[in-house]
Amino acid sequence: MNVRKQSMKHDLAKLSYRITLAFAALALTFVASAADFPSRPIRIVVPSTPSGGLDVLARILSPKLTEKWGQPIVIENRPGAGGIIGNDVVAKATPDGHTLLVVAAGFAAQPFLYKLPYEMPGDFAPVTIIGDAPNVLVVHPSLPVRSAKELIALAKQRPGELAYASSGVGTSGHLGMALLERMAGIKLVHVPYKGSGAATAAVVSGETPMLFTATAAVQPHVKSGRLRALAVTSAKRWPSMPEVPTMAEAAVPGFEVAGWYAMLAPGKTPKATVNRIYTDLIEILKQPETHARIEAAGFLVNGLTPDAFGRLIERDMKKWGTVIREAGIKATDTN
């Protein structure tokens, strides 16, 4: 019996030793992965058309990341399907940090609208929220309204006639407008475009009369008079557009839709590499020049940690899942 017990102890000791070696090897792999990063050009996928909020942030950060990493940064715009086309590119990319993704808050709504070619949230590794920005309700000057209250009154007079643009089904602009319809008791027509740049261009040209979109995407057009800003979706007035009231104070008490713009990596990217990217990004975000450019573009710098960002994604998935079910929104909906 003693011999058997000694043998079992010996076997357990050997197993424990092997497990320790395995974990040590894994840790060394993670450290090596972080040490080797970056070893070639980095691709940042923007799942929307150029000139939108995501594109603006990616292009502000890319030269700073090039300086930091000593590698070229390639911005790749892959619009379509509410961001799914671009997201899928990153979900299936080699998980070594050399392919990154920027997304907006509507990212968390995708699982409730589409049959996705990737798993949410597991096929993505949260890095950080770069900046926060509310959406702003803007209209083409030809629309005879000068406030959110006047717009709602017009929509009630013409139910199902007024159209609004969005950067795709399930994006924050679409969901925010769907929430406004429910809370204000109006009926609008949804016209999705391939990205915020295309949606904004449609409203600037007068093709579609209005949209909710990031403040950064439309501030120049509002300043030039090509668009008229009626309300922001944040709880308080936004610093870069202080003259524009919140939707809650302008017309719909209790209305609020927060917006975030963030960076992710492929889901199996080693934790050490994710932390390296996060740490370097935070250093860049803290630089006065970068900070000022991001705020001038209409965002407030955030910098949430990867773990905290991951928890936020899960909370937002629950929130938007409820909104989508209650509103009866389908991926094929156009209104």
Image (spheres, helix red, strand yellow):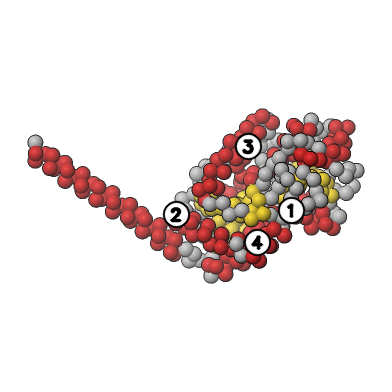
Callouts 2 and 1 close, C-beta under 8 Å: no
Q: Position of residue 73 (x, y in %)?
A: 58, 64
The quadrant of the image that shows the N terminus is: top left
Question: Which residue corresponds to mark 4?
Answer: 291
| Residue 204 falls left or right of residue 11 | right
Nearer the observer: mark 1 or 3; the answer is 1
Considering only order in the chain, which callout, 1 or 4, is on the residue closer to the N terminus?
1
| Amino acid carrying mark 2 in the image | Pro
- Residue 91 image offset from top left, x and y in percent: 53, 49
Label 3 or label 2, whichever comes before in sequence order: 2
Q: Which residue type carries mark 3? A: Trp
Mark 4 secondary-structure assignment: helix
Quadrant for residue 57, please give it. bottom right
Kindly identify which numbered label has been placed on residue 320: 3
Marks 1/3: CA–CA distance = 26 Å
To which residue does mark 2 refer? 270
Residue at point 13% right, 43% down? Answer: 7
Above or below, 49 relative to 10: below
Q: Are marks 4 and 1 in contact (CB under 8 Å)?
A: no
Q: CA distance from mark 3 to mark 4?
A: 30 Å
Q: Residue at x 66, y 33 (%)?
A: 323
Residue denoted by label 1:
239
Q: Amino acid at mark 1?
A: Pro
Q: Considering depth in this image, is 40 or 54 the residue closer to the camera?
A: 54
Q: Nearer the viewer, residue 167 or 138?
A: 138
Q: Is residue 101 visible?
A: no
